[in-house]
């Protein structure tokens, strides 16, 4: 079988099930690192005597490090292969997770979480690059949706597990669970994962090649269409992740286990969305599927926003519209993440890295805003508006991206091979 840009690369030692398992575990690093500790965040903040902005920094610093590190991991994986980058990254993740457990202050925890974000970048970047190594863009969206279904299962378990561990064993135990997950993932990949990059690029780390590669990626309209789709969709999810524990527990009075259950049901709706995505793609194609999901997203955000401005402060007024948002998120993410790297068969690591970096820059900016907006929330006081306004804002951007950029530029065309290989730039 040939390994041209539009055909799968053979991996005789790995079954399709192993590929999906690897994708699920690697992509699952992100939700388990964020979702599992969310129920512990209020108790952690109180235990350290920290401020709300400091507490938010444990999430935003992690995500900024996650985004920036991908700019390094991506070219490294194009040069040396996916397997060594993944193994070193996961080893670093286990060390950082163990360090966070023994943190003596919020400042130390932020440092360990930052290192954890650096390590997480290797895994998630690698997963997106693996899909492009093995599959053409259209099939890549379907395979990515399978991996993201696995991510959804991990996300389902994360918040309830974090809530139970925090409630009965303390927040340090919840952080320790991340080290266990990282170690398990490392063992699976060390045992069964085989290299997927057929042709390593020996010039991938040369400064001139890097500049040419980044320029080729950043000037490609298909990259921007799908990266903005994935970025805006993740922005809405991140807003919920960063604010929901304070709003649901502090304002609406939910217990930690009840909040964990709410997070579980949210993840279930996302899993349903990934199944819907796989059913719609062969019938409607990528662009029409994304457009339909964009309508669902806008409806969800608008209903949630209007109810909040009308003074309705109730769990159902947030969760019921958000279920629809997450169902659409299950369409936008596989299409966005696979579509962003689709044109770059020879530089999938670099394209994956740049896409991931831009997603995390948006999340960091949103986290900084939420850190200021959530001050004063707690013990039944405060407003749900920082959460609902943020999700409404992202819903508008998601739908606009889905209905304009994706419709115009969503048909992936490969970038010139001579540029991504490090040869002379196109004139």
Image: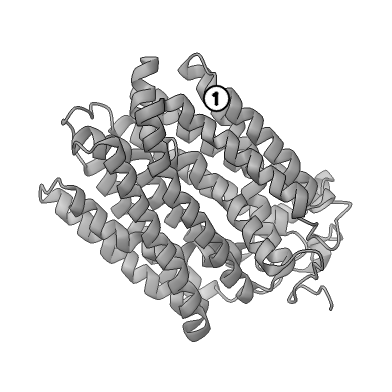
The x and y percentages for residue 3 are 82, 73
Residue beneath the point at 41% across and 74% down: 291
Residue at far left of view? 311
Q: How many marks?
A: 1
Image quarter where the C terminus lies is: bottom right
- In this view of the protein, which residue sits in the foreground, 127 or 12? 12
Image quarter where the N terminus lies is: bottom right
- When asked about the image quadrant of residue 319, the answer is bottom left
Q: Work out whether residue 216 can be spotted.
A: no
The x and y percentages for residue 82 are 76, 52
Q: Is the residue 421 above or below the residue 179 in the image? A: below
Residue beneath the point at 27% across and 62% down: 300
Position of residue 303 in the picture relative to residue 184 (left or right)? left
- When asked about the image quadrant of residue 66, the answer is top right
Q: Is the residue 288 above or below the residue 185 in the image? A: below
Residue beneath the point at 36% across and 61% down: 269
Q: Which residue is mark 1?
A: 100
Q: Is the residue 419 above or below the residue 358 in the image? A: below
Q: Is the residue 22 above or below the residue 294 in the image? A: above
Q: Please say which color scheme the image uses.
A: one colour
The x and y percentages for residue 271 are 43, 62
Q: Work out whether residue 347 can be spotted.
A: yes
Question: For mark 1, does the 10 Å Cα neighbourhood hold few (<14), some (14 to 19), or many (20 or more) residues?
Answer: many
The x and y percentages for residue 345 are 74, 66
Position of residue 361 in the picture relative to residue 340 (left or right)? left
- In this view of the protein, which residue sits in the foreground, 265 or 284? 265
**SS at circle 1:** helix
């Amino acid at each position: 079988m040939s390994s041209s840009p539009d055909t799968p690369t053979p991996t005789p030692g790995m079954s399709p099930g192993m590929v999906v398992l690897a994708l699920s575990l690697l992509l699952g690093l992100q939700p388990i690192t964020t979702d599992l500790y969310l129920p512990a965040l209020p108790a952690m903040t109180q235990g350290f005597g920290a401020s709300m902005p400091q507490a938010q920094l444990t999430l935003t610093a992690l995500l900024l490090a996650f985004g920036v590190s991908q700019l390094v991991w991506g070219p490294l994986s194009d040069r040396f292969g996916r397997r060594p980058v993944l193994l070193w990254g996961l080893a670093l993740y286990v060390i950082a997770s163990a360090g966070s457990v023994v943190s003596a202050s919020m400042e130390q925890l932020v440092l360990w979480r930052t290192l954890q974000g650096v390590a997480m970048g290797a895994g998630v970047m690698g997963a997106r690059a693996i899909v492009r190594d093995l599959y053409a863009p259209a099939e890549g969206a379907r395979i990515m949706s399978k991996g993201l279904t696995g991510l959804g299962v991990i996300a389902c378990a994360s918040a309830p597990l974090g809530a139970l561990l925090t409630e009965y064993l303390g927040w340090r135990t919840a952080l320790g669970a991340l080290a266990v997950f990282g170690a398990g993932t490392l063992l699976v990949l060390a045992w069964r994962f085989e290299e997927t990059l057929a042709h390593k690029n020996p010039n991938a780390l040369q400064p001139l090649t890097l500049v040419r590669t980044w320029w080729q990626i950043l000037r490609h309209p298909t990259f921007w269409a799908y990266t903005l789709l994935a970025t805006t969709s993740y922005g809405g999810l991140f807003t919920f992740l960063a604010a929901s524990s304070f709003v649901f527990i502090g304002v609406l009075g939910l217990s930690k286990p009840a909040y964990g259950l709410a997070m579980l049901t949210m993840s279930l709706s996302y899993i349903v969305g990934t199944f819907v995505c796989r059913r719609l793609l062969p019938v409607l194609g990528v662009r029409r599927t994304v457009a339909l999901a964009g309508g669902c997203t806008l409806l969800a955000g608008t209903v949630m926003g209007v109810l909040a401005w009308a003074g309705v402060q109730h769990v159902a007024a947030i969760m019921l519209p958000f279920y629809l948002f997450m169902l659409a998120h299950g369409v936008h993410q596989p299409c966005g993440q696979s579509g962003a790297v689709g044109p770059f068969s020879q530089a999938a690591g670099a394209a994956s890295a740049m896409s991931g970096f831009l997603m995390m820059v948006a999340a960091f900016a949103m986290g900084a805003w939420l850190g200021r907006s959530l001050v004063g929330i707690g013990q039944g006081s405060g407003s749900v508006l920082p959460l609902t306004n943020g999700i409404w804002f992202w819903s508008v951007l998601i739908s606009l991206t889905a209905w304009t950029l994706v419709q115009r530029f969503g048909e992936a065309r490969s970038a010139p091979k001579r540029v991504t290989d490090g040869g002379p730039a196109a004139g």
